[in-house]
Amino acid sequence: MAWQSPIAPGISWYQSTVTERPEYPALDGSKTADVAIVGGGFTGLQAAYNLATAGLSVVVIEGCRIGDGASGRNGGQMGTGQRWYPEELEAELGYERSKALFDLAENAKKYVLSFAETHGIDMEFMPGQMNVSHKPGHDKEYQRTAEIAATRYGYPHLAYMDGKETAERVGSKRFHCGVRDSGTGHIHPLKLIVGLAGAASAAGAAIHEMTKASSIRQSGGKTLIETPTGTITADKVLIATNAYIGNLEPVTAAHVMPIRSFIGATVPLDKFPSVIPGKESIADSRFVVRYWRRTRDGRLLFGGREAYTSDTPRDISTHIRRQIAEIYPELQDIEITHGWGGSVGITMPRKPFAREVMPGVISIGGYSGHGVMLSNYCGKLYADMVTGKGRELDHLLDLKIPPFPGGAKFRSPLLFLALTWYALRDKL
């Protein structure tokens, strides 16, 4: 019987195409380590791999199975830069900091591709990504973005697309213009995280699935992570739970909010060659973004939702098919073979959250839709900081990320109201 994640609805197409998904034993008894990591996603496992490779003792605990969180169930799009275009960050932070954040993201992209190649992980990388405007009036903005990326940020891979080219490349007349990025692409995320976990384990990191942290406390200069089956005592701790922080640590919970996102996978589109003929990934200009791509075997993977809530629709496929049909009317009756969802971590300003929340305890998350690249690289950067190899993580630690308003009781209702309002505005 297929494994059904207890924290995320639906069996993903990714899961059905991974032939081998190793299991790691639950924690059985107490342990000590140089570094303990809470969360077995991209961030936690990259940190574990790099720390173990450097000779440190590392224990990773994951509340469910490796890949059950966003790292194994996301849209697979790598993007470029941070969540905001570089000129938007430049207006807020100045050129020097904006350039540093852009370069960090480019380093992240290169790192993920290099890691997969070095370890022989076939993560089904496919080149190309497009951002398209669902409303008129963005032509000059998109042209300017491509020009600035090339002239100020040393990134010549963005090209403006007018309405005609956008329609041809997307396979739909629904959009008005766009930007095509030939310097990035999309991947099969579950294959990457399965390979990453194997690499971390082979390097000497102890990985324990189905082991949920119940509390974190400090005593005698050490940090103690309590679980139902044992206590982990460590000199340093990385909290890498992202959207699944729950009530474990209050500072992270105040700054990183979980939102639900859902994806559907269709049958291969052999009869519809005009739908994304170049098989790039696509994201639209909605605040409540929709994202889709063609897989290596020609399926359409489409993600999005009309509003952000913590609820799961009874039939994910119905919601996804309705959105597909808005863009591709010819696919209104297409068979959706898999529908799944999960939680994504966002922050108020849509920038990553990285902070020392207790002495020796760093929390990293809130990638806000850019986690495929950034989460992997942030795990490496955390390890670099611990081992004294570098301080590139400081670019994120220095960001001022405000908490969500409303306190623990009202954060979620206020977010629901705000994002539902944005979803309604997207339709105007």
Image (spheres, grey):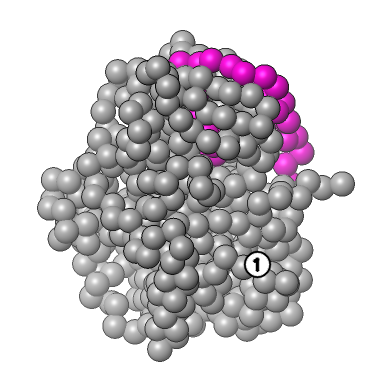
- Vertical comparison of 148 with 34: above or below: below
Instruction: Specify start and end residues of the magenta stretch as a single range.
Output: 17-42
Q: In percent of the image, x 61 and y 64: which residue is there?
A: 262
Q: In percent of the image, x 62 and y 68: which residue is there?
A: 311
- On the image, the x and y values in percent for residue 2 come to 82, 47
Q: In percent of the image, x 69 and y 35: which residue is there?
A: 210
Q: Is residue 67 left or right of residue 394?
A: right
- On the image, the x and y values in percent for residue 413 come to 47, 70
Q: Of helix, strand and loop, which one carries label 1? A: loop
- Vertical comparison of 314 with 159: above or below: below
- On the image, the x and y values in percent for residue 66 come to 64, 37
Q: Which residue is mark 1?
A: 312
Residue at the far top: name it. 55
Q: Choose between 37 and 377: the one closer to the eye.
A: 37
Residue 193 falls in which quadrant of the image? top right
Q: Is residue 368 left or right of residue 71?
A: left
Q: Quadrant of the C terminus?
A: bottom left
- Vertical comparison of 197 with 52: above or below: below
Residue type (three-letter) at the residue carrying disc 1? Thr
- On the image, the x and y values in percent for residue 238 come to 44, 31
